Structure formats: structure tokens, C-alpha cells
Image (tube, rainbow, N blue to C red):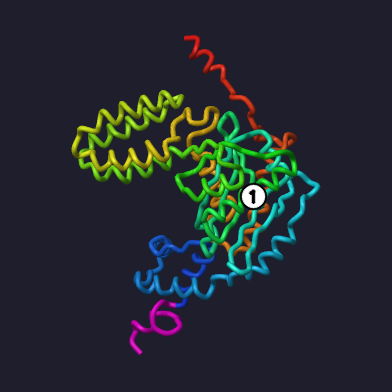
Amino acid sequence: MSDNQHDQGDYEGPGIQLEVRKEIEDFFNLGIVKPSIIMDHLIKKQIQPPSRKQLYNFLHRLKVTKTPAILSLGQLAAACDDVSGLPNEEDKAFVVGRDIDFESKTFRFLLSTPRLLQNSTKSNSLQADATYKLLWYDFPVIVIGTSDKDRHFHPYGISVCSGETSEDFESVFKLLKSGCEMFGEYKPNILIADCAEAITNGFTRIFGEDITRVYCFFHVMKQVKEKLRLVRNDELTSQIKDDIRAMQLATSSEEFLKAKSLWIRKYESIEEVSEFLSYFSKEYLSRRSSWYEGAAPGSPSTNNGLESINNLIKRDGTFRRKLPLREFLQCMLKLLERWSYERNPSSVDTKHFALTPTILDAKYTSAYK
């Protein structure tokens, strides 16, 4: 046996040394699964990392062997039923309802607390957004809530679904409606979300067609920036974005229609903008045009407040780890109880639901000047 072989240390078969495998497995258990990050950590600990191919293969085997077995639908139903029923305590989290179809193998359930659901009586708008990378099997997690008059977001609840179809959103909104109506009539007529038609379809099936659909301006601009790659002129691209942002400040439909007309007139004669102009006119000036400030006065024009909640779930709830469904359910129940208690009037630094806009003294002073 060569000296080099003696220096290799104990390991199981060819490939990664046993001590290095243990280090990688520790990182994996902490939720650190990106090869580049693991290699950086190993180098910082003065451990010679394996080749990238070896690391990829080893991480794949870990995921296969360590990923928890998915709950059966029967087990999921039982887990939901264990924490269902309206609790006596206002900050106690519970399963508002579940919709499990054993034939189609689909599921949806909604979690909340009595206090969070009661906030629905204070607003006629609803915000919804789906996020991923929270569960082992990448089921969408849907956060639902509203914003007060100071545009601070207040969650109503968290839902997990087997998909992100119109039927999924319809079921979630139906569960939400049944939960909110434990405390009074609930019929929101403003929906704020990204441009997914599945959300719109699910919402109108439960709350009716007579609604204002606000398309999150952040998501609109995200699509705009992607499509603007068609325009090779950087100065022109910057001007187009600035003009769209200016158009977004319209305070009424009349003002928006006038701004839209001027915007089209400005760019319709520029050849290199023609393809983008056609796209933007069709998608965001005709079909999905309610992304300006005056589309729903008093309501936010973006879902940024909700998006920040998604980040809180990952940071404070799951600690940026993907969880098995049963563990995630318990984790979200605890997180919802924390959010609920933060809105308890008796708690320190309570998160008050503003029914009228708060105008600071500095605003009054600025207006006077």
C-alpha cells in the first residue's frame, strides 16, 4: 500500500472520504444543499472538497435516502382533523378546513387563527400569492391576507395545495370564505395578485364576477424587463420603463386611458420597439390593465407586503429548509399563532390594523410649505 493511500483516511469504497461524507451530510441536514456553497464551507474548514461530479452524485443519493416518505391522503386527512374545529382562544391556530379528493388524489387545506380571520371584517380587498421551496415535494404554499389603509399586510391564513390550478384556488377561497363567515359576512370585491388567471378564475367562482382585479405592478414590471430584451437600445429601454412607471401613477381610469394613448403615440412610430409595443399593448394595456394606482383607491398596487411574509416564512418558520408535509403543518401552526399574538391589542408593539391612513406631522408640514 502506498503512502498516498495511507494518507487518504477511512472511507467506504472509492470516491469521497468518510470524514468528508460526514461533513457533507451535516450540511445537508441543516438544509444546505447547493454544491457550490458546500464546497466553499469545506474549503473554509480546510477540508479538501471532492470533485463537483462526486458531490452531485452524493447529494443525489442523500436526497433519495433521506427524503421523507410522502403522507398518504388518509394520513393527511387525519393530521388535519386532529387540529380542526374553532378553538376558544383567539390566537390558537387550527385547520379551518380541508378539501381532499381520494379519487383525483388532490388536496387543499387552510390554516389560521380566530384573530387573523376576524381581520377579514375590516377590508374588502384580498391578496393572494403562491410560493415554493418550502416542502420536500414542492407543493405550492398559498398565503392569503389583506393590507390596511397604511398598506401594512395582515395575513388571514396559509394554505397548502397539491397544485396551482383554478380548481385549487377556488377550493382555497371557499375554505377561506367559510372560515371568515364564522365572524360575519365576507364578500371581498378587490383581488390583488400576480397575472395568473387561475387565481382570478378561482376568486370569481366563489365571490362573483363583479370585482376589481388589480395586477401586481411588481410582477408586471418583471415581465416588462424580460420582454424589453427585444429592444437593443439601452437608452430607449430606460425611457420606456420610466414612462411605464409614470403611467402607473395614474389616479383614475380616465387619467390612465389618456396616459395610455400618449404612450402608444410616442412609441408606435419607432421600428425597433414595434414587437415590444405589440406585446405590451395586448397584455397590459388591453387584457390586464388594472396595475395603476387608481385602479382600486386605498388598496396597494403591488403584493410587496405579502411577498415579505413569504420571506418571513422561509427565514423564521422553516429556517430555509424544505420540510416534510406533517412537519410543515406543525411549523405553520406555530408561526400563525405568533403572527396572531402580534396583533393582540394587549401585546407589546401590537400590529394595529389601520382603518384610516396615518398622516405623519412631517406630511402636514410638507403640505403647508
Tell me which secondary structure the magenta stretch mostly adopts: loop
SS under mark 1: helix
Disc 1 crowd rating (10 Å Cα; few below 14, some 14-19, many 20+) is some
Q: Which residues are magenta?
A: 1-17
Question: Residue 238's x, y, as percent?
Answer: 28, 34
- Tell me, yes or no, whether the highlighted magenta stretch contains residue 4: yes
Q: Report the residue at 42% width, 27% height from top.
A: 249
- Left or right: 45, with 296 as reference point: left
Residue 84: within the magenta? Answer: no
The spot of residue 119 in percent (x, y) is: 68, 38
Q: Amino acid at mark 1?
A: Lys
Residue shown at the point (74%, 49%) measured from the top left: 92
Q: Measured along the vertical axis of the image, is residue 136 above or below residue 253?
A: below
Residue drawn at 60 percent across, 63 percent down? 325
Q: Quadrant of residue 326?
A: bottom right
Asked if one can make out residue 182 in the rendered structure from this viewpoint, the answer is yes
Judging depth in this view, the residue of 257 and 56 nearest the camera is: 257
Residue 321 visible? The answer is: no
Q: Residue furthest front?
A: 209
Question: On the picture, is 266 further left or further right than 138?
Answer: left
Instruction: Give the residue furthest to the bottom.
Output: 1
Instruction: Identify the residue under disc 1.
Output: 174
